Image (cartoon, helix red, strand yellow):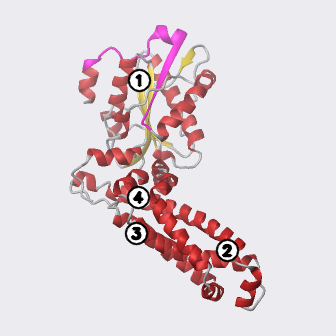
Amino acid sequence: MADETRAAFPNEDRLDQSKSAGSVVLGLIPAPDIPEKIAKELASELPDLLGGRVDGGVSWEVPVVVDPLTGTDREAPEILDVCRERRLREGWDLTICLTDLPVYRDGRLVVADVSAKRAVAGLSLPAMGALRLRPRAREITLRLAQELYERTKEPGADAPPARGSRARGSVGSFRRVDPPDDDMKAMDVDTRFAAPGALGRLRLWSGMVLANRPWKTLPAFKGAIAAAFATGAYVLAISSMWLLADAVGFLRLLALMVVAIVAMVVWIIVAHHLWERPADREQRKWTPLYNGVTVLTISAAVLLAYAILFALLFVAAWVFVPSGYFQSTLKHPVGLGEYLTLSWLGTSLATVAGALGASLEDEERVRAASYGYRQRRRHDDDPEDES
């Protein structure tokens, strides 16, 4: 596809000298959801930042156009071509596309690619992790814009950046691939930033979990949460449970909490067919990644629900369990620790009951809540996948 695209537009891949003397349009093409939000936030800051970091002699315009095509394909080898075609239609000088796809090329986890021949750069947000995503995205977007501008304003697209340029070296912990490898040459990619090692993989997983927005899963399980709270409130009303909570000890309470959370996560995944088992060999290589992200997403949602339920039951215990009666039952003075212990036991038992209630929720609603935009589109595009 890359060769066909270049053949169709042989003379439109260079930054026009007359435009570079007056104004430069740097278009942002984000996928929907989190990339779109970040792109719109950056668009208001980038003109001033680009003037200070890249070229203060021109005025910068940063329009944003959302394109779902940058958020569907698994390896995204054609994202740069898709964004280049959009750049040509919009009449922009340079373009950076922000995708929520994980991108692996030649065994590397790719954070960003720069293609001067296309006047396009691609940025994979999941590879940047979940922490400080916006400042990291701003910094690397500025670097990509600088790389594009310096390479496309010169007569030769293959010429290195001008002497004294700051567009050299790595960006934070993201390593610049130098010299260009065979995959970069085949894709007409001039500059590539990769996220190496275990830290890079950890950031990828956390970034993909962030894209799924686990906190938005809670409304899909309102029935399960209601059942859990009812169970927890019932536990608080049984005096024998007060004695049990006082007797089991910290380690048993911790073990019960872990078992309850694991049971809830497993039951949700199994009951709603969230575990992927694709038949296609090409898709199977991505299965461990996406199944792992699903487990982490549901686990994060269950932990959040557990914390909320614990807080509610603690308030209920503090208000409705009389301290005098509580003390006479336990036969020793009671304080904050005893109320926390009782709430902890009640929350764990209630979570087990909530797992049963979770199976009654609508499967499509749970899928929609558990998956971010990228995951939903991927499932829509692969109706042959087996659940």
Q: In which quarter of the image is residue 343?
A: bottom right
Q: Quadrant of residue 192?
A: top left
> Magenta region: which residues?
8-32
Point out residue 15 in the picture as x, y percentages from the top left corner: 44, 16
Q: What residue type is labelled 3?
A: Val
Q: Which amino acid does label 1 sit on?
A: Ala
Q: Which of marks 1 and 2 is nearer the N terminus?
A: 1
Identify which residue is drawn at 59% across, 74% down. 233
Number of other residues with Cα within 10 Å of mark 2, as a class: few under 14, some 14 to 19, many 20 or more: many
Q: Mark 4 points at which residue?
A: 294
Q: Distance between the Cα atoms at labels 4 and 2?
A: 34 Å
Q: What residue type is labelled 2?
A: Ala
Number of other residues with Cα within 10 Å of mark 3, as a class: few under 14, some 14 to 19, many 20 or more: some
Q: What residue type is labelled 4?
A: Thr
Number of other residues with Cα within 10 Å of mark 1, as a class: few under 14, some 14 to 19, many 20 or more: many
Q: Quadrant of the C terminus?
A: bottom left
Label ID, residue 266:
3
Q: Distance between the Cα atoms at labels 4 and 3?
A: 11 Å
Point out residue 166 in the picture as x, y percentages from the top left corner: 58, 29
